Amino acid sequence: MWERIAAGWRWLGREGAAVGRTVRYAARASGPERDTMVQALKMAGAAIAAWALAGWWLRAPLALMAPWTALALVDATVYRSLRSGLQQICVIVVGAVWASLAMAMAGGSTLGAMIIALPVLALVGTYRRFGTQGVYGATTALFIITYGAYSLSEVGHRLLETCIGAVIGITVNAFVFPPVHLRNVREQLQRLPRDSADLLRRMSEELREEWGTAEAEEWRDRARRLQPILRSLADARQWTDESLRLNPAWNLRRTGAHPPPESEDARWHGIAEHLTVITRALSRSADEESQLARPAPAFLDRYAKLAEWTAEACAAEADLFDEPEDGATVRDRQHRAAQEAWQIYHELADAFGEHTGPAAAVSGELLVETRQLLSALPLPDGSGPQEPKRSPRRGRRTGPTVNGVSGNGA
């Protein structure tokens, strides 16, 4: 029991620390935490304004409908607020009319009206055109039935209160710090090179030491973790496109930079796939039951150096997303890292003809995938992702082709 209490206190401590970090992030700089705080305050402000208009000024008989609707319609995007507002008004009209008919058919009996109204409205709420607003038909019916107001004029009041809340909620969301989800795409794109750099650095460090199945499986697991980031990136693209639709902020006040083009998503999708194949090849070569052999220590030592420079190129690209003042210095660092990585790659490919036996299959696969990975990393000279021209001072060796990598430079 004491262990459970101690575990509970530790959980509360972690949660409290997380809440504290979130508050600090929201107060310190713009970001997801501040966006969430702003949207929450907008929801509260819209509900208060709706109550002030419907309940305090107009003296509406069931003024609760106005703030309730306004609260629900301060959504993540202006387009979604408009769409949800139309859906909610349609659902509430259906709920109010059917609840009034149910009360009339039940002779004013609350229980009888619920039996008549709620099953039908619960089914109507599942209609896909109503989206997540479908549940409000049944809840509107509950308000009307329990309040006992079901005459034609009283139903009109419910619809007026709903429209007041909808107009206030949509207006607040559209004109008070309208949400524009531009940074989410940039943040997800920045995570990809940063996590890729961390993976390559770990591989570089451990390939120089004694490594086995456990280390290789950890590399493979880290590579697989890039896939959820890619899915989050696709979701962020959708949010960005939706947040710019019908949003007056984009033309009125906001001057934020557009997110990187969608071609970047495809490029990093390919890089993640190449890293997955590389780590899978190393994992299989470390498996004692596999028929594949581990590459020679000399090859792995040079490949570790190649992974180190590739990690530096990825890390520099991640830093560029922050738009640093010394951007030229970061691009020079990226350029040098890419050039060093390509030089080591060509040295390994030139010496590939010396590889024999099962180890050559793993070495060849590593070189093929690494070449594709390096080709996807951009060079900062404006030429884009490509393989730079080889230095004429390096000689070439001729060797057999294995897995698409030849001894004359792949």
Image (spheres, grey):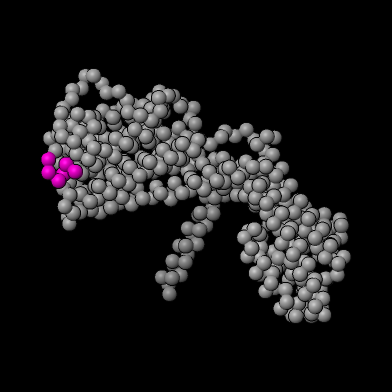
- Magenta stretch, overall SS: helix
Identified at 41% across, 70% down, the residue is: 3
The answer to whether any part of residue 292 appears in the image is yes
What is the magenta range? 356-361
Q: Is residue 12 magenta?
A: no
Q: Quadrant of the C terminus?
A: top left
- Which residue: 29% across, 37% down? 370
What count of labels does the image hold? Answer: 0
Q: Picture coordinates of residue 389 (x, y %)? A: 30, 23
Left or right of 150, for residue 334: left
Question: Measured along the vertical axis of the image, is residue 94 above or below residue 253?
Answer: below
Q: Would residue 376 be found to the left or right of residue 362 on screen? A: right
* Viewport quadrant of the N terminus: bottom left
As rendered, which of 4 and 281 lies closer to the eye? 281
Residue 47 appears in view: no
On screen, 20 above or below 305? below
Where is residue 316 drawn, in percent x and y?
Answer: 40, 33
Q: Is the residue 143 above or below the residue 212 in the image?
A: below
Q: Residue at x 69, y 50 (%)?
A: 82
Q: Residue 61 in the image: state x and y as whole percent.
A: 84, 65
In the rendered image, residue 223, in percent from the top left (x then y), is placed at 34, 47
